[in-house]
Image: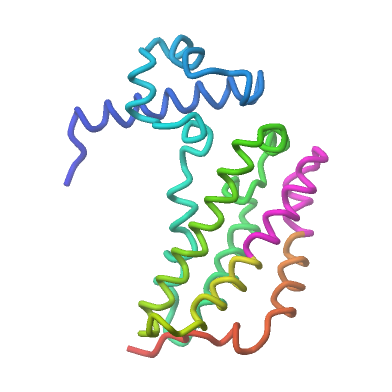
Amino acid sequence: MAEGLRERKKRETRQRISDIATGLFLERGFVTVTIADVAEAADVSVNTVYNYFPAKEDLFFDRSQGVVDRLSRWVRGRDAGESATRAVLRELRAEIEAVSPRMGLIGGYDRFMRCIEEAPPLRSRLWSIQQELQDNLEATLREETGATVGDPLPGLIAGQICWAHGTLFVAIGREMVKGRNPDEVSREMLVVLDDIEELLGEKVLNYAVRGGA
């Protein structure tokens, strides 16, 4: 269904508040900036900010739901004859080759990472997002393979896939914090991804292969 005028205005208001808040956080630090500061800069009430973002951390990680769902989307969209892990590795490679901002390959990402490092609440929220990502992926793998609740394998495979995903992000973040060129980092990360794939065992690489039509 087409987006209605009311829904569009709400989405635009939410995005504007988030963008203004992010600018303030990067400029002055997450801990220093208050919800009242965000409301004043966005020319809205404090209650309006809370209506869209229940916690200050939600303003910073406003796109976290897309991150939490990302690996599961890739697994569900895998090709016939392709395993869950290989689908994720393929998507990661495509993102890196495209020098995608979604992988942190963008100028200014160093400021984003430093803001997290300097704010314990953000580090805690980031850990929670990573755990949600793994839990969501495990649930998807159980659904895709028909595994029973007591079967530990989907959880173990999800852990390995998330290790690969997280390791790549850490490596990218480490280099981008140095203020390096995203294109150069992208080329290096393709090598890192090759190394990660070599470290994954055959059981992980060949888990949940999708059957043909």
Is-magenta flag for residue 169? Answer: yes
Query: Which of the 4 image quadrants contains residue 8?
Result: top left
Is-magenta flag for residue 61? Answer: no
Q: Residue 9 location, x and y as percent?
A: 27, 26
Residue located farthest toward the front when viewing the structure as drawn: 150
Is residue 165 found left or right of 4 in the rendered image? right
**Image quadrant for the C terminus?**
bottom left
State the predominant SS element of the stretch in magenta. Answer: helix
Report the magenta residues as a range: 165-188
Q: Residue 66 location, x and y as percent?
A: 44, 50
Q: Nearer the viewer, residue 168 or 98?
A: 168
Q: Nearer the viewer, residue 5 or 116?
A: 116
* Vertical comparison of 148 with 140: above or below: below
Is residue 17 found left or right of 105 in the rendered image? left
* Vertical comparison of 98 with 153: above or below: above
Q: Nearer the viewer, residue 187 or 24?
A: 24
* Vertical comparison of 197 with 104: above or below: below
Query: Which of the 4 image quadrants contains residue 178?
Result: top right
The residue at the point 37 percent across, 13 percent down is 44
Is residue 119 found left or right of 88 in the rendered image? right
* Vertical comparison of 106 with 86: above or below: above
Please tell me how many numbered marks the rendered image carries. 0
Q: Nearer the viewer, residue 98 or 172?
A: 172
The residue at the point 66 percent across, 23 percent down is 29
The residue at the point 60 percent across, 43 percent down is 124
Q: Residue 12 location, x and y as percent?
A: 34, 27
The way the protein has been coloured in the rendering is rainbow
The residue at the point 66 percent across, 18 percent down is 28
